[in-house]
Image (spheres, rainbow, N blue to C red):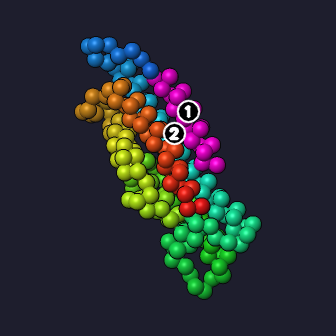
């Protein structure tokens, strides 16, 4: 499930780092190298976004399968049902399906890896953003997401901060190193 997604992410990030790696000259990077760093940042961000979305989807799928098999709500489904307002005039099955569809829409509409994105993906599934997740990971994701935003939404001339290969790769590696602990937090209540 999500562990597979982590392996996919790690493999893809390794490929991206290899594609966009260059020897940084002492006098500063060239415009081509700057574009390589911009591409690395944007593409890695996209892969991380996909990872978080697929991880949330895997938790939702597991909750649905558990329900279908046992007619019991696991931790994530119970949290999701408690998180959304239930129509007391509808059947439980109808409401459950409606709430699952609403949450599926949240996953589909996600566009980022910042704290607000992690919160919208995982709080409905019963996780406390401040207690369950490493604040260092969330801070690093927020910083990386903000940097990606400035690179993706502004032209090269508008980006005022200088891109640094060592810093970007270091940030990517730090996030990857923290994800197994993130997953451990996700699966602890299950």
Whether 24 is drawn above or below 79: the answer is: above
Which residue: 35% across, 36% down? 151
The image quadrant that residue 23 belongs to is top left
Q: Is residue 14 magenta?
A: yes
Q: SS at mark 1?
A: helix
Residue at 32% across, 18% down: 29
Residue in the picture at 54% in, 35% down: 10
> Mark number for residue 36?
none
> As rendered, which of 150 and 55 lies closer to the eye?
55
Identify the image quadrant of residue 39: top left
Number of numbered discs overlaid on the protein picture: 2
**Percent coordinates x, y for residue 93 in the rendering:** 67, 76
Q: In this view, does 32 lie above or below 69?
A: above
Q: Seen in the image, is 181 located left or right of residue 131?
A: right
Q: Which residue is drawn at 54% across and 69% down?
A: 79
Q: What element carries label 2?
A: helix
Q: Left of 158 or right of it: where is 127?
A: right
Q: Which of 151 and 40 is in front in this view?
A: 40
> Is label 1 in contact with label 2 (beta carbons under 8 Å)?
yes
Q: Mark 1 points at which residue?
A: 12
N-term-proximal mark, 1 vs 2: 1
Magenta residues, start to end: 1-20
Which quadrant is the C terminus positioned in? bottom right
Q: Mark 2 points at which residue?
A: 47
């Amino acid at each position: 499930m999500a562990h597979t997604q982590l392996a996919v992410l790690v493999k893809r990030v390794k490929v991206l780092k290899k594609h966009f790696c260059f020897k940084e000259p002492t006098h500063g990077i060239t415009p081509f190298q700057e574009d390589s760093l911009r591409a690395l940042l944007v593409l890695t961000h996209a892969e991380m976004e996909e990872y978080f979305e697929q991880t949330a989807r895997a938790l939702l799928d597991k909750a649905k399968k558990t329900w279908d098999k046992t007619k019991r709500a696991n931790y994530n489904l119970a949290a999701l049902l408690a998180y959304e307002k239930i129509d007391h005039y509808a059947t439980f099955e109808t409401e459950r399906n409606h709430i699952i569809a609403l949450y599926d829409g949240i996953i589909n509409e996600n566009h980022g890896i910042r704290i607000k994105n992690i919160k919208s993906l995982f709080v409905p599934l019963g996780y406390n953003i401040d207690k369950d997740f490493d604040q260092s990971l969330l801070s690093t994701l927020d910083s990386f997401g903000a940097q990606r935003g400035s690179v993706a939404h502004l032209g090269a001339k508008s980006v005022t901060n200088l891109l640094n290969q060592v810093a970007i790769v270091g940030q990517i590696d730090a996030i990857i190193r923290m994800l197994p602990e993130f997953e451990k937090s996700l699966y602890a209540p299950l």
